[in-house]
Image (spheres, grey):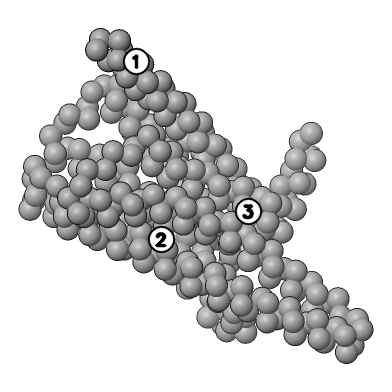
Amino acid sequence: MQDVGCILQLIRTSMESWFWILGWFLSFLTITGNGFTIFLVCSRRTLRTKTNAFIVSLAVADFCVGLSVIPSLFFCDITNTCDWPQHLRTWVNIIRWLFSNTSVVNLCVLVLDRFIAIVHPLKYITLMTRRRITQAIFFSWVLTVSYNVLKDTLCIVLYQNKTCPFAIWVMTIVFEILPCLILILCFVSMIFHVRRHDRSAHTLAKQLRFNHQESFKTHREKSAVIMMGLVIGVFLVCYGMYLRCSFLLLSSSPCHDKNYKIPILVLNSAINPLAYAFFKRDIKKEFKRLVAAVF
């Protein structure tokens, strides 16, 4: 029995070591990638466009995810502060999960912006003015911060030393189920629009035998849809793990999945800048130009 106990202890130690190695690697990747995205867009005048404003806002949220999630857990583990009273741990969780929720809201705003640009291009120019874009980014941060502070404050007051069912229900619906539905519907609509536009352009090209402008527009739309597909796909896979755990908590069942759920959360924030670098034409162009200038 002692040998079995030693083996189990070694397995737990090994899993914990791999958790921290993977977590810190993904955190470093998240901080580096999103930090570089923020620097590149802010330092290049040609990249200061309406869409890139949403990308910078999302990159700031993802950058803060890399700074807060794994480092706070590591500090909690090495200092044994995970055994703090409930109200103190709740305020730590506000900081830990605030930026994750902000990242979700900013991703939804970015996808809605691309949805309007692709499906309703004529309305986009008049609808998405710089003032409205600034307001959308501002409210995506302010509303998320206000919601998290208010929710956790109510949990401290009403459920001081117990699990807060109100918080679990709201988190599951507002930041997991609803964003997944919004992203799926927008992405499917963009795919159908691009396919319909592609067929129309192909028919027109046959009639006119030459139409470079229409072909370029179709290619540009396809690149935008591919980028959104990659970002949305990673988000759905990562937050599918959260839905599983949330449903377990809602049914009063324990959920012990920190060893894969937390790194997957950080992975979602690490993938986004890679999608911009490979599939967003203007960022990809400036990235190649910067690499060529440096090396």
Tag 1 residue: 7
Q: Residue furthest front?
A: 1
Label at residue 276: 3
Q: Earlier in the sequence, mark 2 or mark 3?
A: 2
Front-most of 133 and 14?
Answer: 14
Image-based side of 83 in relation to 60, left or right: left
Disc 1 and disc 3: Cα gap in Å?
A: 44 Å
Q: In x, y percent, where is residue 176?
A: 36, 59
Classify residue 13 by image quadrant: top left
Tag 2 residue: 105
Residue type at tag 3: Tyr
Give the vertical position of 189 relative to 65 (above or below).
below
Image-based side of 287 in relation to 12, left or right: right
Residue type at tag 2: Val
Tag 1 secondary structure? helix
Tag 3 secondary structure? helix
Classify residue 203 by image quadrant: bottom right
Could you tell me which quadrant the N terminus lies in?
top left
Q: Earlier in the sequence, mark 2 or mark 1?
A: 1
Tag 2 secondary structure? helix
Front-most of 235 and 272?
Answer: 235
Q: How many marks?
A: 3
Q: Residue furthest top?
A: 2
Q: Earlier in the sequence, mark 1 or mark 3?
A: 1
